[in-house]
Amino acid sequence: LGVSLHSCGLLTDAALEVCLVNRAAFVLCPCCYGQLTTSHSAPESDLASSLPRSSAFATLRQVTLAGPQEGGGESDFSTIARAADCTASPGDDNFTSSKNFKVAKRCMQLVDADRLCWAAQVTSRSSGSQGGYAVALGSLTPLTSSPKNNLVFGWPRSRDPQAFPPLSLADCVALEASRGESAVAEAAERQAAIAAAEAGTQTESQRGTQGPRVGDKGRNGGQKLGRPQEELPKEKP
């Protein structure tokens, strides 16, 4: 079993290759997606220049957006990889409900889906009678444990060919994997909004039924409201 936790950039791909060569199952938690296509990840390497690696994501090698360098451009995959990097302030447990994290989560899943598609693709061609790999995407629990909370899994099919279904196109684009998480997050947001609305209604209702308090200034002459003074008995004529 191969395991890596928050292995930066191409280190995740290196760990993945070691597992495939040794036909080991793997559980990998990638990190620093943006380094996949920057100068920090040794651009002269064949791996960095060949991203995305799978045929399923080959169209993302196209350069359709202007890049940061003058006169240059970057591939769609590079844009996705950079957008997959999301950070959170220490102690911020609500980052999973932010729009930035939701975008980053989709992008992380796309990058990791390319890794898994490539793993299934190369092992199905080279393994012969042994069979290729079954692969899947997942997440750390809870999601708030880290902004980089994606998990990639793989098992050699020869161990139990019926245990894991082939990677489908829906899995490739990684939308199904995140749909449940988004539904949970949206349901939590709706519940929070309902609770806030109910709390506000109760507060307004309490204000309406309490009436003026002793010591509060009234609107008539600025007099304070309190106990009415007892009338003095009238003298007899």
Image (spheres, grey):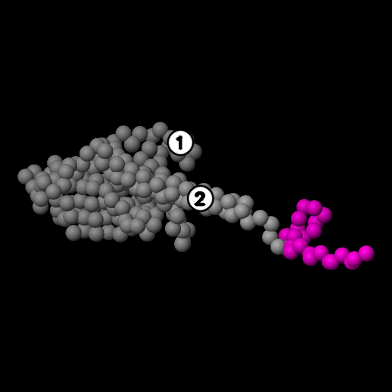
**Can residue 86 be seen at all in this image of the molecule?**
no
Decide whether the magenta segment is chiefly helix, strand or loop: loop
Quarter holding residue 113: top left
What range of the chain is rendered magenta? 216-237
Q: Could you tell whether 55 is left or right of 211 in the image?
A: left
**Can residue 185 be seen at all in this image of the molecule?**
yes
Q: Amino acid at mark 2?
A: Glu
Of 198 and 13, the residue lying toward us? 198
Quarter holding residue 183: top left
- For the point 54% across and 52% down, the residue is 202
Q: Amino acid at mark 1?
A: Ala
Q: Name the quarter where the C terminus is drawn.
A: bottom right
Where residue 39 appears, as percent x and y from the top left, is: 40, 49
Where residue 46 appears, as percent x and y from the top left, is: 28, 46
The tag earlier along the polypeptide, 1 or 2, is 1
Where residue 166 appears, as percent x and y from the top left, is: 17, 42
- For the point 51% across and 50% down, the residue is 198
- For the point 29% across and 37% down, the residue is 57
The residue most toward the right is 237
Of 95 and 208, the residue lying toward us? 208
Mark 1, residue position:
66
Q: CA distance from mark 1 to mark 2?
A: 48 Å
Q: Which label sits on residue 198?
A: 2
Where residue 142 appears, as percent x and y from the top left, is: 35, 57
- 228 drawn magenta: yes
- 232 drawn magenta: yes
Q: Could you tell whether 111 is left or right of 168 in the image?
A: right
